[in-house]
Image (cartoon, rainbow, N blue to C red):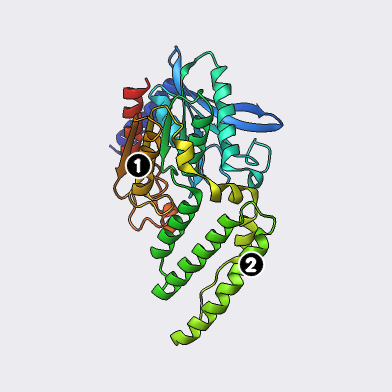
Amino acid sequence: MKKFIWSVLSLMILSVATFARQTFKVDSTIIIQNDSLQIGASLYMPAKRGKCPAMVIVSGTNPQDRNGTMAGYPFFKQIATFLAAKGYAVLVMDDRGVGKSTGKYQYATTEDFANDALVAIKYLRAQPQIDHKKIGLIGHSEGGAASAIAAAKSKDVKFIISLAGLATNGFTSLIQQNEDLVNNSKLSQMDKDRSNRINRLMFETALKYADSSCMRVKLNETYNNWKKVDDSLFKLSGAQFDHFRFPIYSYVNQAVGKWYRYFVKYDAEAVMKQIKVPVLAINGDKDLMVAGLENLANWKNYIAAGGNKKVTTKLVPSVNHLLQKCETCRPDEYSKIKSGVDAEILNMVATWLNNNIK
C-alpha cells in the first residue's frame, strides 16, 4: 500500500513538473547592453506560439539578484513563473553589480534604475514573439517609483503593476517608514520618541543640504546638537542605563551618497501626473516599509491629477512588504514565513492583466 501511495505521489510531482515545462520556457543567458553597463537577465516565455504581452520586473532598494531573493525566498522568480504559465512573458534582471550585471549599485539612483528598465523594454521590443504594444513594468517597493519615472519618460511603457510600490515623495517616505518601524519595534516609549526625533532632524537636514558640498558637515552638526540636548534629558529622566544609539557614522556615509541625495528630493506627484497608461497598485495593510493606505491614495490621486483615471488600487489585509501573509509583520518575521507572494495577490495581478492588457 505504501509503495502504491508513493508511486501516485511521484506521478503527481512528475506531472506538475511536466506541466510547468509545457506552459513556459526560460532563457537565462540574456545579456542586455546599457551603454557601458551590462545587465544579466532571464526571460520567462509562454510555450505557446504567437505574440504575447510582456513585463519587466523592477526591484526595490538594496541590490538583488534576478530571482528577487529576499529573506531566503525567490519572490521575482515566483511571480515570473506564475505569469509565464498564464501566457505572459516576464523579464527579470540582476541589479547593477549583482550576478551577471556590471556597474556599482551604490553609485546609481532611482532614475538610473528607471533607465535600466527602459533598456530592458527596448530589448523586449526587439523580440519577434513579444507584442510591442503590450509591454509594461512590475515594480516592487522603490521599483514602483522607478517604474513611474520610466513611464513618465517613455511611451514604450504601456502599463504599470505596482507591488508594495512607492508613490510618495522621498523625504515623506523616509519619515513614514522610519516612524512605522520604530513605533512597531520593541523599544521603550522613551527610546521610540528619541529615535523619531533624531531621525526627523537628520532627514530634514539631508533634504535641506542635498545639493550642497557641506552636507556631511551639516549632518554631523545636527547630530551633535541633538546629542547635547538628548544627554541632558536622559539624565533628568532618572533612568540608570542608556542603551539607545543612533548609527551616525553609517547614516552620514549613506546620506552623502548619490542615491540618497536623489531620493530625499524625489517628487512623486510631479512624476506621476505624467503617467498616461493603465496602472494596478497593490499594497499590504501591514507593510512597515511602504505604508499601504497612503501610497495607494497617491497612486490614484497623483496620476488622476494628470487626467488619467485608469488606476486600480487594492489594499490587502494582513500582508507585509514582501506581500506575504503575516502575523507580527515586522521585517524580522519575513524569513520565518517560508513562503512568497500571497496567492490572492498573484491572482489579482492575473485577473487585472486578463481584463486590461491581454
**Neighbour class for label 1 at 10 Å: few (<14), some, many (≥20)?**
some
In the picture, the quarter occupied by the N terminus is top left
Asked whether 252 or 210 is in front, the reply is 210
Q: Is residue 105 left or right of residue 277?
A: right
Position of residue 26 measured from the top left corner of the image (x, y, whole percent):
52, 25
* Amino acid type at mark 1: Asp
Residue 239, visible in the rendered structure: no
Above or below, comparing residue 335 to residue 82 in the picture: below
**Neighbour class for label 2 at 10 Å: few (<14), some, many (≥20)?**
some
How far, Cα to Cα, is label 1 from label 2? 43 Å
Residue 171, visible in the rendered structure: yes
Residue highlighted by disc 1: 342
Tell me what residue is drawn at x 49 percent, y 35 percent: 147
Residue highlighted by disc 2: 220
* Amino acid type at mark 2: Asn
Disc with the residue nearer the chain's start (1 vs 2): 2
Q: Are marks 1 and 2 in contact (CB under 8 Å)?
A: no
Q: Is residue 257 left or right of residue 243?
A: right
Q: Find residue 356 and name its label.
A: none
The quadrant in which residue 331 appears is bottom left
Mark whose residue sits in front, 1 or 2:
2
Q: Is residue 87 left or right of residue 97?
A: left
How many tags in the picture? 2
Position of residue 111 measured from the top left corner of the image (x, y, whole percent):
58, 38
> Under tag 2, what secondary structure?
helix
In the picture, the quarter occupied by the C terminus is top left
Q: Is residue 343 left or right of residue 275?
A: left
> Under tag 1, what secondary structure?
loop
